[in-house]
C-alpha cells in the first residue's frame, strides 16, 4: 500500500524527536544560532544532512550535527526532510 | 544619526542583489537544492556566511557560496542577514 502524506508526515515527526529539541517541534528554533527548518526546501535539507554526515561542514556549529547525521540512512534523511519542509506552526499568536 | 529599521532593510536589500538571483527577492528560492532564507535566524545566517568564507562548508553546493562569501566584510554579513531574516513575501497568492 502507498503511504499517505499524513502517514509520511508522522513517520518524519517520529524520527525528528531529537532534532526538535534544538530546531523546534514546528521547525522554528528557540536559539538565534540554530536555523529554522520550517518550510525549508526538502532537497536542500537532504543535501545539508549528507554534508554533515560526510564531515563537509566543519565550522564550530557543525560538530553536533555531524554526530547526529552519522547515524542517519538515506531514508531517514528523506523522512526528516519531508517533515520539516511540510511542518507549520499550529498556534499563530506568536 | 541612528539608522531606522527601514533604512537597515534597504541597505541589506541593496547588498543582496547577487544573493536574490538564487535565493529569491523574498528569500524563497526557486530551486529545490537552494535553501530558503526568508525569516531565517539572523545569527545563524551570519554564522553560515562566515563558515563559507572560511571554507568550512565544502560540499558540492558550497563552492559558489565560498566564492561570494570571500568578499564579504562582517558588516556586509550583518546587513545581508538583517535583510533575509526580515524579508516577507509581498504577494500572498502563491
Image (cartoon, coloured by chain):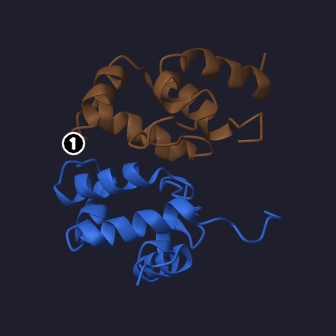
Chain colours: A brown, B blue
Image mark count: 1
Q: Does B72 appear above or below B45?
A: below
Residue A3 locus on image (x, y percent):
75, 21
Residue at 68%, 38% in the rendered image: A86
Which quadrant, please, contains the N terminus of chain A?
Answer: top right
Residue at 25%, 72% in the rendered image: B72
Residue B51 makes an appearance in the image: yes
Farthest residue, direction left: B54
Residue at 45%, 79% in the rendered image: B3
Q: Does B45 appear above or below A20?
A: below
For label 1, count other residues whose C-alpha is less than 10 Å away and answer few (under 14), some (14-19) or many (20+). Answer: some
Q: Provide the residue designation for mark 1.
A: A59
Give the camera-side residue of A36 and B33.
Answer: A36
Report whether A60 appears left or right of B93: left
Report whether A31 appears left or right of A65: right
Residue at 49%, 73% in the rendered image: B20
Farthest residue, direction right: B93
Residue B5 locus on image (x, y percent):
53, 73
Which quadrant, please, contains the C terminus of chain A?
Answer: top right
Q: Does B36 appear above or below A63?
A: below
Give the camera-side residue of A68 and A73.
Answer: A68
Residue B29 makes an appearance in the image: no
Amino acid at each position: 500500500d502507498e503511504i499517505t502524506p499524513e502517514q509520511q508526515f508522522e513517520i518524519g515527526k517520529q524520527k525528528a524527536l531529537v532534532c526538535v529539541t534544538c530546531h523546534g517541534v514546528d521547525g522554528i528554533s528557540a536559539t538565534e544560532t540554530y536555523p529554522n527548518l520550517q518550510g525549508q526546501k526538502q532537497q536542500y535539507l537532504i543535501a545539508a544532512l549528507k554534508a554533515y554526515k560526510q564531515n563537509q561542514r566543519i565550522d564550530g556549529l557543525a560538530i553536533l550535527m555531524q554526530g547526529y547525521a552519522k547515524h542517519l540512512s538515506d531514508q531517514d534523511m528523506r523522512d526528516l526532510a519531508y517533515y520539516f519542509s511540510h511542518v507549520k506552526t499550529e498556534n499563530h499568536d506568536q
